[in-house]
């Protein structure tokens, strides 16, 4: 008698993982870039700290609102599709059964077996089957607006706290360099953790997130220095 082996599919993490990585990445990049830009304009430490804290709060709220609105729109679309599918199953059950049969035929099953599978799955849970096979809606990929909003806001704040801590701990003369270097290290670590958790290529993800973080900080540092010189 064969024994079933346990499987742990990483795709089940995609909902919260996407929001967490995006939030923390934005928290580090946005806040570090803001701090570097303001510091490059020769502003005092207290003003830099205030700007950083304001950026953290505004960014966390923006991330939460953006994720909530975006994922809510996705959820509304999914619910509308499910309602339409529910109505079609009630009004035209045979047509929906034929449609499901054709889906399985296109996936490689013979007509008779496809019909048998369609009938059995329809008898088990018709709406769930059509949602999965016809609409592509599965439970671990379903939109969860509140979860996405809270995860993004929290991870943004955690990411932003890292460069903010360096404003307090680092000497003023070394602030730009210490925030830049430490933030890039944080970004590299975040990219590696996110890739490992999602089963992706660690090196590729690390290089990608570090490159764009460095580009953002370099751009804001240049603008800050230019504005500080002009004013």
Image: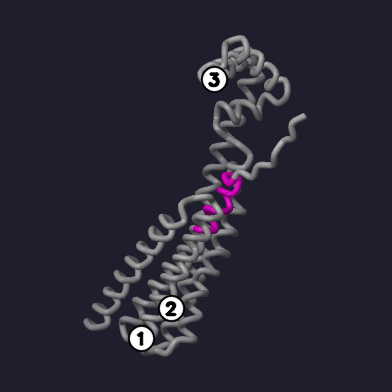
Q: CA distance from mark 1 to mark 2?
A: 10 Å
Q: Residue at x 67, y 24 (%)?
A: 126
Q: Does 65 appear above or below 105?
A: below
View extreme (front): residue: 1
**SS of the residue at dot 1?**
loop
Foreground of the two, 97 or 5 = 5
**Magenta stretch in the rendered image:** 10-21
Residue identifier under label 1 = 43
Query: Residue 154's x, y, as percent?
Result: 58, 64
Number of the label disc, if any, that sits on residue 51: 2
The N terminus - image quarter: top right
Rendering colour mode:
one colour
User: Magenta segment, principal secondary structure?
Assistant: helix
Comes first in the chain, label 3 or label 2: 2
Q: Does 84 appear above or below 198?
A: above
Residue 64 in sight from this viewpoint: no
Foreground of the two, 126 or 108 = 108
Q: Residue at x 27, y 79 (%)?
A: 225
The C terminus - image quarter: bottom left
**SS of the residue at dot 3?**
helix
Q: CA distance from mark 3 to mark 1?
A: 64 Å
Query: Residue 106's x, y, as percent?
Result: 51, 18
Q: Quadrant of residue 124?
A: top right
Q: Residue at x 64, y 27 (%)?
A: 129
Residue identifier under label 3 = 103
Query: Residue 228's x, y, as percent?
Result: 27, 82
Query: Residue 47's x, y, as percent?
Result: 42, 85
Mark 1 and mark 2 in contact? Answer it, CB < 8 Å.
yes
């Amino acid at each position: 008698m064969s024994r079933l082996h346990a499987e742990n599919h990483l795709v089940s993490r995609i909902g919260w993982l996407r929001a967490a990585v995006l939030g923390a990445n934005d928290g580090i990049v946005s806040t570090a870039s803001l701090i570097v830009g303001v510091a490059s304009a020769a502003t005092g430490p207290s003003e830099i700290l205030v700007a950083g804290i304001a950026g953290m709060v505004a960014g966390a709220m923006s991330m939460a609102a953006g994720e909530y609105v975006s994922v809510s729109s996705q959820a509304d679309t999914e619910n509308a599709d499910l309602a339409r599918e529910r109505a079609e199953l009630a009004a035209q059950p045979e047509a929906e059964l034929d449609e499901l049969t054709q889906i399985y035929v296109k996936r490689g099953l013979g007509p008779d077996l496809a019909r048998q599978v369609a009938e059995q799955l329809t008898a088990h849970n018709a709406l769930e089957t059509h949602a999965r096979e016809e609409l592509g809606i599965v439970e671990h990929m379903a939109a969860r607006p509140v979860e996405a909003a809270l995860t993004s806001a929290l991870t943004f704040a955690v990411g932003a706290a890292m460069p903010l801590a360096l404003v307090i701990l680092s000497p003023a003369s070394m602030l730009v360099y210490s925030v830049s270097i430490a933030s890039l290290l944080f970004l590299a670590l975040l990219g590696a953790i996110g890739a490992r958790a999602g089963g992706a290529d660690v090196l590729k993800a690390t290089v990608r997130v570090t490159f764009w973080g460095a580009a953002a900080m370099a751009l804001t540092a240049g603008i800050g220095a230019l504005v500080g010189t002009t004013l």
